Amino acid sequence: MLIAALSNILFSATLDTPKMSSIRRDNKRLEQRFEILQGKVASAERTLADIKHRDQYVYRPILGVDTLNIPAVYSDYLDSKYEHLLEDEYYGEITVVAWKRMDRLMRSIYYSSLALDATQKLAENKEEYSSIVPAIWPIDRTKLQRVSSLYGMRNHPILGIWRMHEGVDLTAPTGTAVYATGNGTVSQSGVRNGYGELVEIDHGFGYKTRYAHLSARFVKPGEKVTRGQIIGEVGNTGVSSGPHLHYEVRYRDNTVNPIHFFNKDMSAESYKEIMEQLEKSSK
């Protein structure tokens, strides 16, 4: 009996039973299918990366629009979503890895579809879009004394604290004409905390511009304006240390650097000069 028991143990350890042999074949097939699936996912990821690259670096620059940014798309789901997959003792970990990768892929597909839809809309409305994008200076550059503050973090000249400056400050004499930088509809015209006398224009396609610290406003909410139309005058209202225009460009409710739009309407030398000011102010 002892010899029989030892023989059985030895046989089981060295030779597969029909059942174990079947299980091993099934596992091998699953592993092969998993590898094929991973290969297809990798191929889809490469295709999406190429689509995203063309959208951001070819189509959108041609149309003169910023890249689409949806922060939530880049965030993974919570690990709790995948806890039930860990119940499988053998395949739990690799299944979770596969599901996470698939979820990232689906979110990337969603992102790309939104980006391409937006780009297609811009392309279909290229003529209208070209008239609304904020593409000129908001004041006459011959009246510009200096760019006193640029977009980005700064030490507030009055409050004395570091905070985000969401536009650019263009120093000019009080009464200097302020122009709408693109076609649109006046969404605000009045006094606003910090901004003083303010005009905000909704240009459509996700763009808005703000013109603050004015001494005079010549437009009302709901009024249609065209690029180059005088909408107010430079002033020193609100939280301001001297006569200047605070100018903001907003896209999809997020501020963007107005300097990039000024570049459409300035020489390379002027742009370089402003960027040098930016480097000095950041030191």
Image: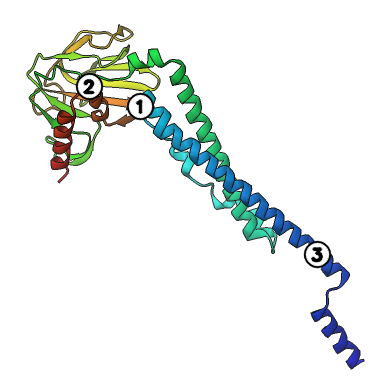
In this picture the colour scheme is rainbow
Residue at x 58% of width, y 40% of height: 106
Q: What element carries label 3?
A: helix
Please state which of the two labelled residues, at mark 1 or mark 3, is closer to the viewer: 3
Which of these two is toward me, 192 or 233?
233
Residue at the far right in the pictured view: 1
| Location of mark 1 (residue) | 251
The mark found on residue 23 in the picture is: 3
Q: In the image, is 88 to the left or to the right of 137?
A: right
Amino acid marked by disc 3: Ile
Labels 1 and 3: the sequence-earlier one:
3
Q: In this view, does 197 lie to the left or right of 111?
A: left
Of the image marks 2 and 1, the number of the one nearer the N terminus: 1
Residue at 17 percent across and 15 percent down: it is 178
Query: Residue 144, position in %: x, y?
Result: 10, 22
| Amino acid beneath label 2 | Asp
Instruction: Give the mark nearer the N terminus: 2 vs 3.
Output: 3
At mark 1, the secondary structure is: strand
Residue 69 point in image, percent of width and height: 41, 35
Residue linked to disc 2: 265
Give the image location of residue 212, x and y in percent: 20, 21
Query: Where is the N terminus found, in terms of image quarters?
Result: bottom right
- Assess disc 1: are there few (<14), some (14-19) or many (≥20) residues with their C-alpha within 10 Å of its C-alpha: some
Numbered circle sitting on residue 44: none
Q: Indicate the quadrant where residue 176 lies.
A: top left
